[in-house]
Amino acid sequence: MTDTVIFEKVAKRFGAFAAVDDVSFSIAPGTLVTLLGPSGCGKTTTLRLIAGLEHATGGRILIDGVDVTRRAAAERDVSMVFQSYALFPHMSVLENVCYGLRASGVARGKAEAMAAEKIGLVGLSGLERRLPSELSGGQQQRVAVARAIVLEPKVLLFDEPLSNLDAKLRRRVRDEIRALQQDLRLTVVYVTHDQQEALAVSDRIIVMQAGRIAQDASPRDLYERPVSRFIADFIGDANLVPGTVVAGGVRIGGGVAPLDVAGTGAVLLAIRPQAFRFGMGTLRGRVVKAAYLGSHMEYGVQLDGLAEELFVIGADTMAPLQAGAEVAIEIDPAGVAVVPAA
């Protein structure tokens, strides 16, 4: 089966600046792939290249086996859900969802029937006659999704779709988008700068840095096996800790942690904040700050012989440690990866 989206050495330059620089990837049908990265990394430009809102200055873009590199947006059989939703304020929910169909020449009766079906799929049946101003932010988002999928595109594109929602609503709508994508086997390209959002919804994540792909992997591989210092630092708040492989483990600061890690001599460890355990352990340190966050504690810990303060997450909120407490620390090997120092 042909991959739905294929990038072959695609570049997009604005003058001397390469927003997208020699990028290649493919997206299998029925999968959700997220483009993730900090501001200015090229992820939104990449999405716009798929949509035809930008045109490549190098390479090829194929959708469902067809070279669309030079095709206009209207010729690409893709639909896009924008960050702002872009709903027509004077049109009802039904009219908004019908709009693309009617613009394509579909008869009103058929368009309304197709729109009503998709409105039901996104859980808005009974709200067809409401205006966007009469809907919540989450409901407006679902109208935008219904308007996109009613066209039955080869590829559905999301550009930071949850950025206008509060934290609790973001989680709910995120789960709804993922469930809908899986139920309908939609091919989705999703752009976000939010690491947790990407981890939650994606089959694959393409992390971009300075216009290039820094790592392309499953959410689990990305989190547990980062290939660079940038990835380890960007995904999941890792502590980047220098160490030295010695007999019995890795020397970190003034102690030796019994870790079996790849490498010899000096190494750089990416240690997840949840991997630290207080109580028994060969490392010694002191809590310098403590913050209660409801479901967990967050600590700043100064390890003996280590210059950088560690960021540690503790599960015990009933008997939290206090700033100034002396602690013994061990490290769960499952939360440790060796990354290149550069």
Image: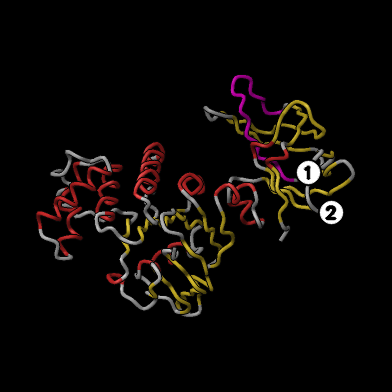
Identify the residue at horizontal 25%, vertical 48% (top origin): 143
The x, y position of residue 254, in whole percent, is 84, 40
Between disc 1 and disc 2, the foreground one is 2
Residue 11 lies, in percent from the top left, at 49, 75
Sequence order check, earlier mark of 1 and 2: 2
Q: Secondary structure at mark 1?
A: loop
Label 1 and label 2: CA atoms lie apart by: 20 Å
Residue closest to the far front: 1
For image coordinates 58% across by 45% down, the residue present is 236
Horizontal side of 183 relative to 272 (left or right) equals left
CB of mark 1 within 8 Å of CB of mark 2?
no
State which quarter of the image contains the N terminus.
Answer: bottom left
Answer whether residue 118 is magenta in the image: no
Q: Which residue is mark 1?
A: 306
- Residue farthest right in this picture: 247
The answer to whether 283 is drawn above or below residue 195 in the figure is above
Q: Is residue 313 magenta?
A: yes
Is 306 situated left or right of 105 in this image?
right
What residue type is disc 1 on? Leu
**Residue at the spot x=53%, y=73% of the render?**
22
Dot 2 amino acid type: Thr
Magenta stretch bounds: 308-324
Quarter of the image where the C terminus is located: bottom right
Characterize the local packing of mark 2: few (<14), some (14-19) or many (20 or more) Cα atoms within 10 angstroms.
Answer: few
Residue at image mark 2: 264
Q: Is residue 241 left or right of residue 47?
A: right
User: In the rendered picture of this protein, how many numbered marks are placed on residues?
Assistant: 2
Residue closest to the eye, 183 or 223: 183
Q: Nearer the viewer, residue 312 or 270?
A: 270
